[in-house]
Amino acid sequence: MRQAALDAAEAAERHAELEMVKELVEAATMPRAVLGLAATLEALNENRVYHLFIGDGLVASGSECPKCRWLVTGDKGCSACGEPTIPLVDWDRLPAVSPGGPIRWRRY
């Protein structure tokens, strides 16, 4: 019985996450939602992220400034302070908190 309840809760959570992704895609035309790596990193840099959806198996080229923590696409220098950047290999290391509170992560 307990396992059935856990399975049902997992299924409900997964359904809710898929609905949120669907809403995100539909809302992408609005100014408060972004899609794509460059726009997402910009929103993270500006502390404008509440929900962050990352697809499983994400393959993207991004870098982080070790001095000011600014995130950029590719391996170009930091656009905020000009310092050299280091590759961002572990996408789970992205900022976890914004001024509005913790960022809600979702992998799908």
Image (tube, rainbow, N blue to C red):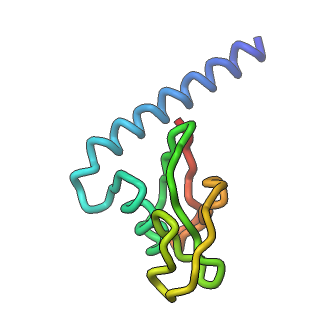
Q: Residue at x 70, y 22 (%)?
A: 6
Give the image location of residue 72, x and y in percent: 48, 69
Q: Identify the residue at image location x=23%, y=56%.
A: 30
Q: Residue at x 62, y 25 (%)?
A: 9
Q: In the image as oriented, which residue stretches furthest toward the left?
A: 29
**Residue 66 as seen in the image, left or right of residue 72:** right
Quarter of the image with the N terminus is top right
Q: Relative to residue 70, is residue 19 drawn left or right?
A: left
Q: Is residue 86 left or right of residue 1?
A: left
Foreground residue among 4 and 93 = 93
Residue 29 vs 79, above or below: the answer is above
Residue nearer the viewer, 100 or 66: 66
Residue 96, percent from left and from top = 62, 62
Q: Is residue 77 above or below residue 74?
A: below
**Residue drawn 60% across the image and 67% down it:** 97
**Which image quarter: residue 107?**
top right
